[in-house]
Image (spheres, helix red, strand yellow):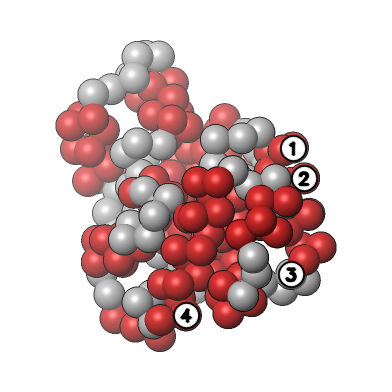
Amino acid sequence: MAPSYWQQACSELARADPVLAGLVGRYAGVGLVSRGDPFVTLLRSIVGQQISVKAADSVWARFLAIFSNPTPVEVLGCPPEALRGCGLSARKVEYVIDLARHFASGQLDVGRWSAMSDEELVTELTTVRGIGVWTAEMFLIFNQLRPDVWPLDDLGLQRAMAIHYYGGERPPRRVLAAHGERWRPWRSVATWYLWRSLDPLPVEY
């Protein structure tokens, strides 16, 4: 089920921008859907870093052979060599363990997130080793369904903006930031439709 704000966001963006109006019309009936458990979502994002989708799926399948439904406590109780046996690099094993520690200790407390701003949540998430700003922003969009995230470092967004608004030239970061201001408070939704213009099939993060 799409977020409660989705239809309002689509209507307002379509009225304000002809490009987005076309994309909203083309991809009517689909939208953001939360990717489920926050710990598992972040865990899978670490597993998939800097490897192909096929390789990530293979590593994740081996991971699930050990943990059918991974929890922080279970991951912390697993020997590092068993995690390495799933196909994780030594560094990713460190990242996975650090993520589990953050959840198990309450440093990452899902119950507090609804009261936090996007910036505060990004700051909290990036205290985990292996989670950078881009990964945190993808989490805010795809797991937390935050409506106004504008991921300036995302290559897909940069490419779509170049194609639709800047004659094929990727705009400087400051220009991209300024352009996004016109779409507040629905920049996540604008981003989602711009991604669809490059790849009609929604990608999971």
The residue sitting at 66% across, 56% down in the picture is 81
Answer with mark 1 or mark 3, whichever residue precedes in sequence.
Answer: 1
User: To which quarter of the image does residue 200 belong?
Assistant: top right
Q: Earlier in the sequence, mark 1 or mark 4?
A: 1
Q: Quadrant of the N terminus?
A: bottom right
State yes or no: discs 1 and 3 in contact (Cβ < 8 Å).
Answer: no
- The answer to whether residue 39 is seen in the rendering is yes
Residue 201 vertical position relative to residue 138 in the rendered view, above or below? above
Is 58 displayed left or right of 121 in the figure? right
Q: Amino acid at mark 3?
A: Phe
Instruction: Tell which tag, 4 or 2, sits nearer the viewer.
Output: 4
Residue 175 vs residue 130: left or right? left
Q: Amino acid at mark 2?
A: Ser
Q: Which residue is mark 1?
A: 54
**What amino acid is at disc 4?**
Ala
x, y percent for residue 100: 50, 70
Give SS at disc 2.
helix
State how far apart marks 3 and 4 are (Cα): 16 Å
Question: Which is more toward the observer, 12 or 185?
Answer: 185
The image shows residue 179 at horizontal and vertical percentages of 24, 36
Front position in the image: 62 or 79: 79
Q: Cβ–Cβ below 8 Å for labels 2 and 1?
A: yes
Is residue 8 placed above or below 88 in the rendered structure? below
* Mark 3 or 4, nearer chain start: 3
Q: Which residue is mark 3?
A: 67
**Residue position marked by numbered label 4 in the rendering:** 104
Q: Is residue 49 left or right of residue 140?
A: right
